[in-house]
Amino acid sequence: MSKNNSKNREGIVYSTDPDFSYQDNPENEITTLPPQQQKLTISLDKKGRGGKVVTLIVGFVGKSEDLETLCKYLKNKCGTGGSVKDGEILIQGDFREKIFTILTSEGYKVKKSGG
């Protein structure tokens, strides 16, 4: 058994059962919800960004790869830059209306927040 594998087995030190086999917790795996079950919130933010405005999309539940894919899709549709940070999508500029329309047409439940 390698050291890296033993760190994933927290709480199991020794077992006298000869038939014991360690099972990983599948509950730690996050599955991406379908768009109809997602509840996203769109807001405008400019705090800590040097006065520049970004459209912030929060509330996505799922894998980070799927969040990155959605971010890339939105950046492509808006024709602007953006990124994913701390489970939130940041799109440069004020694109609240356009993103609201895009996400609604994709089947997401979307709510506007602030202003």
Image (spheres, rainbow, N blue to C red):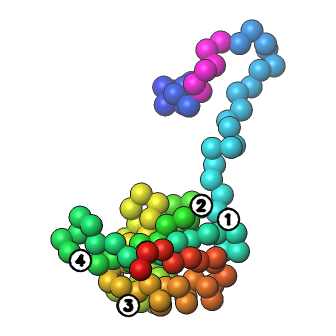
- Classed neighbour count for the residue bearing mark 1: other residues with Cα under 10 Å, few (<14), some (14–19), many (≥20): few
First in sequence: mark 4 or mark 3? 4
Secondary structure of the residue carrying numbered label 4? loop
Residue under label 1, please give it.
33
Inter-mark Cα distance, 4 to 3: 17 Å
- Classed neighbour count for the residue bearing mark 4: other residues with Cα under 10 Å, few (<14), some (14–19), many (≥20): few
Q: Amino acid at mark 1?
A: Leu
Residue under label 3, please give it.
79
The x, y position of residue 97, in whole percent, is 47, 89
Residue farthest right in this picture: 19
The x, y position of residue 80, in whole percent, is 34, 86
First in sequence: mark 1 or mark 4? 1
Q: Amino acid at mark 4?
A: Lys
Q: Amino acid at mark 2?
A: Gly
First in sequence: mark 2 or mark 4? 4
Q: Amino acid at mark 3?
A: Gly
The answer to the question of whether label 2 and label 1 lie on touching residues, with beta carbons closer than 8 A, is yes
Give the magenta part as a residue range. 9-14
Decide: is 98 above or below 69. below
First in sequence: mark 2 or mark 1? 1
Reply yes or no: does residue 94 show up in magenta: no
- Classed neighbour count for the residue bearing mark 2: other residues with Cα under 10 Å, few (<14), some (14–19), many (≥20): some
